[in-house]
Amino acid sequence: MANDTQIPLEVLRIASTSGSVRVQAVAGLGEVSGDGAAIVVEGSGATVAATSTRVAMSVPEGLDLLIGTSSGRVEVLGCVGSVAVVTTSGKVSVDEAMAVDIRTRSGKVDVDAVAGECRIIGGSGGVTVGRCGPAHVTTDSGRITLRDVNGAVHAHCASGRIDITMATASDVDAETVSGRISIAMPAGAKVRVDTPTSAAVAANGEHDCVVTTRSGSGRVVVG
Amino acid sequence: MSAVVPVAEMAAIVFTDLVGFTAYTDVHGDRAAMDVLDRQSSLVNDQLAGQGRIVKELGDGLMLWFEDGPVGLTVARNILASVCAARDHHEFPLAVRMGMHVGDVIERGDDFVGQTVNIASRVADLAGPGELLVTEQVLRSLDENAQTAAFRPVGPTRVKGVGAPVWLHRLAT
C-alpha cells in the first residue's frame, strides 16, 4: 500500500490475535505490502490489525517493526531496523536487525545478528543469539546461548544452562539458580571473576572486564 | 429496595513480581524466602509514603493502587530504582519486574477488581528482571514529555476478554 502523504515509513505495527506473522525485508522496496489483513498508513507509521489469520508482509529494509500475536510463529527475514515482538507461544526468528526486544512465554527464540541491543524475555523455550551488541536475556527454564557478543551481558535463567561466547572483553552478569554457566572470553582478556564457585583462572589487579556469576547449584566455568 | 451499584473510578494499578523466587526458595529455604518478602515490603513501603497503598500480596508479588497515572508512575520508578540499588549492593537477592496500567477500577472491600487490574497483571508477566512495563494508557495520562521520553515501544499484547490490543512500553534504564 502506498503512503499517500509521501512521508517515509519508519515503523510497521502488526497486532494479530493469533496465527503466524512473516515479514520479509526487501532491498529497494519503497512501501509495505502483504496478505492477511488491511494496512492503514498514518504519518510515518503503518498498522496491520489481523484476526486469526496468517500475515505475510514485504517491507523496505531498515523499517522498525512492532509485532504482537497470541500464538503462531513470528518470522522476520532480511535486514530490518528495531524489532519488538510480544507473543505467548510459537517460535520467534529474526535474521538481521538493528535491535531486538522479544517477549514470549514458551516459544523458542532464534536471532542471527543484531547490531545493537538484544533484549529477550523468554519462558520455557531456548534462546539462541548469534552476533549481537549488549544483551539482556532472561528465561524461566530455557537454555540461553549467546555466540558472539560485543557488549555487556545480563543473562538470567531460573533453571536452565547459560553459554556465552564474548567477542570483546565486556562485563558479564550471569545468573542461574540451578543450571550450569559457561562463559568464554576473547584470548588475552584480563578478567576479574566475581563468583564463589568459579573454576576459571582469574586475573587479579588490572582487568578489562568483570564477570559476575551466580549459580545456586550448577557449575560455573569462565575461560 | 434498590441494589447499590458499584462506582468505577479511575486509578493506576501496579503489579510487582520477584524473578526466580520459587527457585530461590528451593535452594535457600523457607526462612530465607520469608526474609526476602519482608525486605521487599519494607522497600516498597519506604517509597509509597502515603502516595498509594499495597492492595494485597500475591505470593512473591504485590498489587499496588494509586489515585492516578503520574503519581503511580513516579512511585513505581522509585520502587524499581530502590530494589535495583539494594540488589547492586548485595542487600537484596532477587530482581523485581513490574507492570502498570491505568483505567477504571471498582472497589470491593479492601480490594479492587476490573479489567484494569487484569491488564496490569498481564503487563507485569511480560516484564523482564529490573524492568517496568506500562501500557499506552499510562503514557497518555502523563503531561510531561520528559517522562514519556524515557519509554521505548515494546509492541502489542492481547489480554483475555479485551478486544483491542494492549500496546506496551518499557522504561529505558
Image: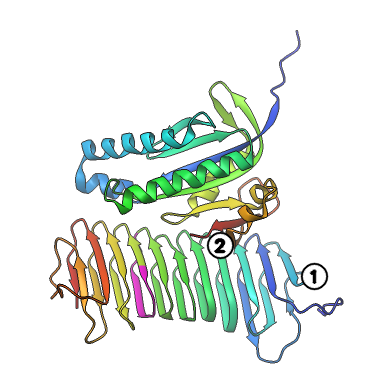
Residue B119 visible within the image: no
Residue B65 position within the rendered picture, expressed as x and y whole percent measured from the top left:
55, 34
Report whether A46 appears left or right of A150: right
Report whether B101 appears left or right of A45: left
Chain of residue at mark 2: A
| Amino acid under disc 2 | Val
The quarter of the picture where residue A74 lies is bottom right
- State the count of labels: 2
Q: Nearer the viewer, residue B137 or B166?
A: B137
Q: Earlier in the sequence, mark 1 or mark 2?
A: 1
Q: Nearer the viewer, residue B36 or A189?
A: A189
Disc 1 to disc 2: CB gap under 8 Å: no
What residue range appears in magenta? A141-153
Q: Nearer the viewer, residue A142 or B152?
A: B152
Q: Are marks 1 and 2 on the same chain?
A: yes
Residue that badge 1 annotates: A43
Residue neighbourhood size for the residue with mark 1, other residues' Cα within 10 Å, grouped as few (<14), some (14–19), many (≥20): some
- As displayed, is residue A148 above or below residue A100? below
Residue B37 visible within the image: yes
- As displayed, is residue B120 above or below residue A118? above
Residue A127 position within the rendered picture, expressed as x and y whole percent measured from the top left:
40, 70
Chain of residue at mark 1: A
Point out the frontmost of discs 1 and 2. Answer: 1
Q: Residue furthest bottom?
A: A28
The quarter of the picture where residue B73 lies is top right
Residue B59 position within the rendered picture, expressed as x and y whole percent measured from the top left:
38, 37
> Is residue A151 shown in magenta?
yes
Q: What residue is shown at x 30% (from left), y 75% (from top)?
A: A164
Residue that badge 2 annotates: A86
